């Protein structure tokens, strides 16, 4: 993405959260103008969760950067008690508008700042395309804050695009991750238990679905 396009979107490396609210504030419950809104759970996540049994005892799930809320609803339909957050107040309002009967706790929160009260609170954490939506210089903080949410023995599912060339600000958004994101989570006590790659392009870009388990 070139500088002109970043400017048009209002992307600012030092205020990385702000442009999301600008997009959602002028959108609606059809997701107009939001480039990633497909008004459904992510297809890879939908496939992954389809064959899983409903959870039997009360289990908690957290959706990071929930956007318009469809992934949270997929988890609620499996029996999880779900919290789903986004930095954009307007995105959260649209989630509530779209799913008035849902018991999902849709709430505004900031992954960059972290949420100390959610430390190791969730059995299942889902992160789709949020780390890659923020500039590379925040990567370590974002990964640490996502890892923090997972209970010992809990699981983390990440869907992200990955590239071989080093991430640089001038190339995003999105800022595709490098392969070493898996090592970064492993260093924080999350063991990679599966990694499927569903798209590979000639320029070395891949789409990953990774599942980690937090050591107890
Ligand atoms: C590329 S979108 C992906 C949305 C959703 N996960 C999906 O797959 O459709 C990234 C989302 O992360 C949210 N986001 C960006 N920065 C955030 C932050 N610091 N804390 C929480 N959410 C954030 C954005 O508002 C946006 O909804």
Image: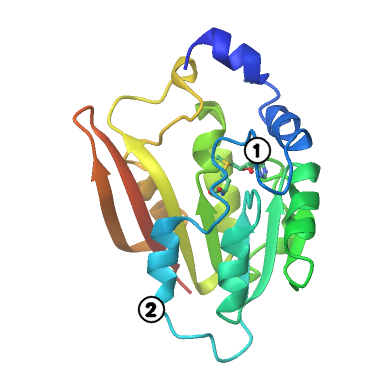
Q: Which mark is residue 41?
A: none
Residue 192 in the figure: left or right of residue 104: left
| 2 vs 1, front mark | 1
As drawn, the residue found furthest toward the bottom would be 56
Which structural element holds mark 1? loop
Q: Which mark is residue 32?
A: 1
As drawn, the residue found furthest toward the left would be 202
For image coordinates 51% across by 85% down, the residue present is 54
Contact between marks 2 and 1 (CB within 8 A): the answer is no
- Is residue 41 or residue 81 the one in the foreground? 41
Q: Residue 186 location, x and y as percent?
A: 39, 55
For image coordinates 72% across by 49% down, the residue present is 29
- Circle nearer the N terminus (2, 1): 1
Q: Is residue 80 above or below residue 181?
A: below
- Is residue 213 or residue 131 the one in the foreground? 131
For image coordinates 49% across by 37% down, the residue present is 132
Rendering quarter of residue 158: bottom left
Q: Is residue 5 above or below residue 55?
A: above
- Is residue 91 or residue 162 the one in the foreground? 91
Give the Cα distance between marks 2 and 1.
Answer: 31 Å
In the rendered image, which residue does mark 2 sit on? 51
Q: Residue 76 location, x and y as percent?
A: 62, 74
Q: Residue 128 location, x and y as percent?
A: 50, 50
Q: Residue 107 location, x and y as percent?
A: 78, 56
Residue 4 in the figure: left or right of residue 203: right
Residue 35 in the figure: left or right of residue 114: left
Neighbourhood count class around disc 1 (C-alpha, 10 Å): few under 14, some 14–19, many 20 upward: few
Rendering quarter of residue 142: top right
Q: Report if residue 149 is visible in the image.
A: no
């Amino acid at each position: 993405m070139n500088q002109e396009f970043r400017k048009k979107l209002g992307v600012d490396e030092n205020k990385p959260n702000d442009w999301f609210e600008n997009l959602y504030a002028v959108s609606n419950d059809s997701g107009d103008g939001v480039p990633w809104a497909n008004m459904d759970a992510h297809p890879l996540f939908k496939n992954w969760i389809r064959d899983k049994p409903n959870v039997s005892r009360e289990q908690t799930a957290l959706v990071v950067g929930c956007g318009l809320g469809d992934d949270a609803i997929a988890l609620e339909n499996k029996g999880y008690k779900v919290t789903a957050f986004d930095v954009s107040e307007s995105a959260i309002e649209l989630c509530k508008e779209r799913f008035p009967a849902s018991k999902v706790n849709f709430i505004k929160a900031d992954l960059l700042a972290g949420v100390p009260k959610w430390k190791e609170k969730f059995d299942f954490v889902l992160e789709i395309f949020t780390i890659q939506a923020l500039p590379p210089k925040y990567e370590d903080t974002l990964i640490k804050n996502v890892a923090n949410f997972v209970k010992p023995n809990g699981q983390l599912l990440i869907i992200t695009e990955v590239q071989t060339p080093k991430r640089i600000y001038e190339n995003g958004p999105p800022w595709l991750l490098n392969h070493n994101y898996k090592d970064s989570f492993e260093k924080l006590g999350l063991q990679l238990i599966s990694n499927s790659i569903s798209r590979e392009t000639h320029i070395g870009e891949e789409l990953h679905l990774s599942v980690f388990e937090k050591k107890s």
